[in-house]
Amino acid sequence: MYRALYRTWRPQTFSDVVGQQHVTNTLQNELKANKLAHAYLFTGSRGTGKTSCAKILSKAVNCENLQDGNPCNECEVCRGIDSGAILDVVEIDAASNNGVDNIRDLRDEANYTPVRAKYRVYIIDEVHMLSVGAFNALLKTLEEPPEHVKFILATTEVHKLPATILSRCQRFDFKRIEPQDIAGRLNFVAEREGFALENEAASLIAKIADGGMRDALSLLDQCASQSKNVTADLVSNVAGLTGHDHLFLLADCIKNNDCAKALSVINDLHNSSCDMERLCTQLIDHYRNLMIIRSVKQPEGLIVCTAAELKQLETQAMSYTLEHIMHILGVLEVTCGNLRKGLNRRVETEMAFVRLCTPNLDSSVDALLKRVAAVETAVRTGAVAVQQPVVSQPSAEENAPAQPAAPAPKTLPDGELGCWTDVIQELKTFNLPLASMMFNTYAVVKDGVVNICHNSAFLVGKFKDEESRKDLKKAFYNITGTDCLMKFKKIAEPANIPEPEPIPHETDPLADLLSRAQASGIDISSN
């Protein structure tokens, strides 16, 4: 009977395990030193080698002829474990045996000594599926098992395990396998199986597998069943990467604000029995690819697609700003969440595209940021023409002689600048700290150069600052209408600021009355 490739080529020794050297090296060293833990916990995503390592370890602890920390796979115990003839190694699926009674039976059975092997080994797969009561029933046995018992727990969701279980196990984290390691293993399997595998096809399968060797071998198995010459196009067809033209078309509709075209495409997809939630998910993946291209210099390693599709994605990504892409992703995420709530899927999808294709309808912060970014891009590239003021047509009399000459540039006469105070007041509106330091200065114009007279060494250093110099020239231009060269001139005394008029002393009201009476000729001496 035919066996799937992932079963046929399951690793039989630690040396066969790909991409998990940090785990296999440690286990081999423990076996060679005979320092074995009583309980192991293997965690990681699917297809990374957890169950394979558990089976290899179960053979290695019982192997009669251990080879450098690897099972020999030739002795009677190794062959019996592989064939299932030796019942001292028990593999339990916690998804279907997750009750308290199942764990109690396991606990009672663990008390018996092994029949043929050295250790009784219990491999509990998907251990996170055990119930709370089952975990509690396992705790004591897991912490202090009999000398002849080893536990190997495997899970893809380690966060669901109680801390009491985690603290009783020696934990190993299996990482996602690198694409180059998967591609190398695929080439090895293809060579042994006798079919051709292109390097580009192997790399594409490795990307699609997303770090899982089992998924990669399963996809290779599918491709090999269609043709003995596995190419990138064949992998793309089998994996369903082709036929995404509608995603590019809908993205163009959003970019061009073509609401009618977008609704027409959605109608065609709906009539073709396309699920709207799947369409929304595909669009999220599509715009995620555009986001990666706009954010990363070399996006090839982060995007699963063919070389031709990558070029098409790069072309479309260049027509978007990153702000626009992020806004679209936000709208699609909300829409996908609403579709899962059981609302009218078609209407919800159409509403999303109407909002995306008609920016004026969307008043969210993300939409406003996207519109601002579009304006900034248009101004930066010159795509927006500045509206010129409307000039009335001159009459025939006005147009008769010659056109007046353009006014000559405005120049400042030499001497002290009388509007310098106004310049400082103007500077105060947008650079108050600089204006406050210049209140005791005055300006003198000589040969078109504005000499700013002062007695502060700190002010010269401040004027060397680019922003301060620009602000001062801006204030000067706003008041005088000229753009002159400015220099700072150190003087010994502060600026000639007119002294304030003396405040008159208050006079005695009685003395004032007497002086006015004497001025009027009234004699008050007798009084």
Image (cartoon, rainbow, N blue to C red):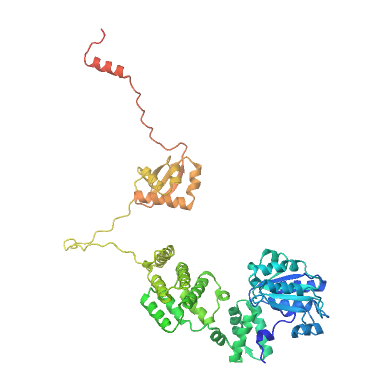
Who is closer to the viewer here, 47 or 411? 47
Is residue 188 visible in this depiction of the protein? no
Q: How many marks?
A: 0
Q: Quadrant of the N terminus?
A: bottom right
- Which of the 4 image quarters holds residue 417? top left
| Residue nearest the observer in this picture, 21 or 79 | 79
- Residue located 43% across and 51% down the image: 471
Taking the image as shown, residue 486 lies to the left or right of residue 403, namely right
Q: Quadrant of the C terminus?
A: top left
Residue 47 position, x and y percent, is 65, 78
Residue 57 quadrant: bottom right
Most foreground residue, 428 or 296:
296
Residue 236, given in percent of the width and then of the height, sits at 55, 84
Residue 497 visible here: yes
| Outermost residue, right side | 64
Q: Residue furthest front?
A: 101
On screen, residue 175 versus residue 496, left or right, reads right
Q: Is residue 448 above or below residue 123?
A: above
**Vertical arrangement, residue 141 with respect to residue 478, above or below:** below
In this orientation, which residue lies closer to the viewer: 315 or 277?
277
Residue shown at the point (58%, 87%) measured from the top left? 231
> Residue at position x 50%, y 42% from top?
457
Q: Position of residue 230 (x, y in %)?
A: 60, 88
The answer to whether 504 is drawn above or below residue 164 in the figure is: above
Q: Position of residue 204 (x, y in %)?
A: 58, 81
Q: Outermost residue toward the top?
A: 526
| Residue under the point 41% across and 51% down | 473
